[in-house]
Image: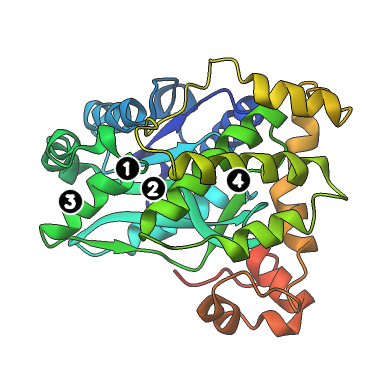
Amino acid sequence: MLDICDMTFVVRCAGERTMAASIALLRDQVEALGGDPDRQVRPVTERPFVNAVRATIDLGIAGNRPWTIGMDADVLLLSGGVRRLAAMCAGAGDGVFTITSLVYCKYFGGFCFRGIHAYPTRLLPEARPLIESSRAADSLRPETSVVNAMLAKGYTMLGPPTPVGSHDFEQSFRHIYLKMRLRARRELGDEPGKTTTDYFEFVKARAHADPDFLVASWGLNDGRQDALTPGTPAQYDWEAPYPELDRRLAHAGLTEKSSLDLDGARGLADRLIAAHDYSGDRRTPKWIRDKHDFASGPAAADAMTGSTTPLAA
């Protein structure tokens, strides 16, 4: 496993309700493994997101540690999440530019690759100019634009089927709405004419039982409309008023959530992943379901949380 002191962590924050918990869980794990969280964990609040990508690269270069981890503050790590990240980095070949991490995502409804990218720091000076040349600032996926530009130069990307945390759970209504509004635009923008039918149906089917999904459905609908409206900016202003959201919340009798209890966030990712319906999962990519025998139910849960032998990267 990679030594914890060889990793710089940059937590990209955009007002997530989980922000403090995400940072605290990460700091705890870094310290438990013998690292120095005061030096190795660097929260950033730069916006729009392309500036957070730039900060990730710059802080990684300045930290001068072999690996730089960019983690979004909507991720809550598994209790062994940092250890798993370190093992993935240790196993990467020389040609790898990034490792993208598997997370359990509330609105995807299963496991997918989001929220964390690990980079060998030695390649970041080569990647930094690509922020401009790839026109990442004009993209709905600025970090992906930089990654794709590096892949075009011959580097590779890894996506080990080893979960490291949960994603998009316990967010504020405002964050859910804006995140899903952007998500709809990204999904529609990935491939001209592509529909988000499966995604929309999964969210809509749960909107009557969980207000988070109700708010998510509003964001998806508005994002779809944005995608069809020429001239809509690529990014949303997270500080701006959204009266369309306020009206809907009032009509539905919903008030914004209070702050997240940090104690309740500890171990939350482990509990969520352990409780997932593995045998009924049809959302996680089939190759991952097959690899870890989701049909076995509890045995798959033990493996995915790390209760049994750690998964191979």
- C-alpha separation, residue under disc 2 versus residue under disc 3: 15 Å
Q: SS of the residue at dot 2?
A: strand
Q: In the image, which is nearer the foreground, mark 1 or mark 2?
A: 1
Inspect the image, locate mark 2, and give the three-letter code of the amino acid beneath it. His
Q: Toward which corner of the image does residue 290 lie, by quadrant?
A: bottom right
Percent position (x, y) of residue 77? 60, 45
Q: Are marks 1 and 3 in contact (CB under 8 Å)?
A: no
Q: Which residue is mark 2?
A: 117
State whether residue 32 appears in this view. no
* 12 vs 9, nearest the viewer: 12
Which residue is tagged 4?
220
Secondary structure under badge 4? helix
What residue do we see at 17% from left, 44% from top? 122
Asked if labels 2 and 1 touch by Cβ distance under 8 angstroms, the answer is yes
In the rendered structure, which amino acid carries the disc numbered 1? Glu
Q: Secondary structure at mark 1?
A: helix
SS at badge 3 = helix
Residue 41 sits in which quadrant? top left
Depicted 261 relative to depicted 111: above or below: above
Residue occupied by mark 3: 149
For the N terminus, the quadrant is: bottom left
Left or right: 249 with respect to 217?
right
- 16 above or below 74? above
- The one nearer the camera, 141 or 287, is 141
